Amino acid sequence: MASQKTCRLLRRQGLTDYGEALALQRRLANARVSGELADDILILLEHPRVITLGRGAQGANVIRSRDMLELAGVEVHEVERGGDVTYHGPGQLVGYPIVDLTHHKRDLHWYLRQLEEVLIRAIAAFGITGIRVPGYTGVWVRDRKIASIGVHVTRWVTFHGFALNVSTDLSDFDLIVPCGIEEVQMTSVEREAGRAWKLDEAAAQVARSFGEVFGLAVEPAVLTDLP
């Protein structure tokens, strides 16, 4: 029997600057493409308030002006991931899987469904039933969106990823039209479960679900040990 493949879990505490995290993803993705990095990586972290614009982003979906966002301390980044406009902020668990799909399945749609399954399983541990909505990527709780997904793939290696609202200040989503979906209502683990949950608790569930769904043994990693 073949041994189980490994995924290295890089869990970063505190708030990580978005630009720093983006540079880290690109570096690790290049290392995975070149073979310098032998294992898949799952980065789990939390960002300060930031808006990201994917390749399909419409400027009108950022409701506040750049000047107003700057005064409010909200950064804006244009990135290579798919999708429209997304918000990240404190209380939100952000996951960046660096996955070589040649070792799984060379199918981007399959990969997106796998990420949805990871999140659906993770929030089930908090007594929340997550669902998919046909025609959209992400995870909902009935008609409320709890997690967003947007990825980029280079030579079948993924980066960017997903954002799960755990204890996020949901009023910050009023800055944008989330994912370009008009009148979408955002929700969080805290709101749906009716009690507070720590980000570390959500991270542990997501990491466990990620290993199950992708058939990987998840082992902790230290940044200084990575290429």
Image (cartoon, rainbow, N blue to C red):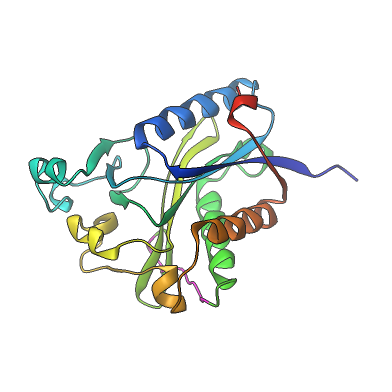
- Residue 39 position within the rendered picture, expressed as x and y whole percent measured from the top left: 68, 33
Residue 226, horizontal then vertical, whole percent: 62, 26
Q: Residue at x 35, y 69 (%)?
A: 187
Residue under the image location 60 percent in, 22 percent down: 227
Q: Residue furthest right?
A: 1
83 relative to 204 in the view: left or right: left
Position in image of residue 222 (x %, y %): 63, 33
66 inside magenta stretch: no
Front position in the image: 3 or 146: 146
The chief SS type of the magenta part is loop
The quarter holding residue 205 reads bottom right
**At x 55% / y 34%, what residue is drawn?**
156
Q: Nearer the viewer, residue 91 or 87?
A: 91
Write the residue at 48% across / 37% down.
159
Q: Which residues are magenta?
A: 128-136
Residue 129 part of the magenta segment: yes
- 143 sits to left or right of 158: left
- Residue 188 shows in the view: yes
Q: Quadrant of residue 184?
A: bottom left
Query: Is there any visible trace of residue 80 in the rendered image?
Result: no
Camera-nearest residue between 190 and 82: 190
98 up-or-down from 129: above or below: above
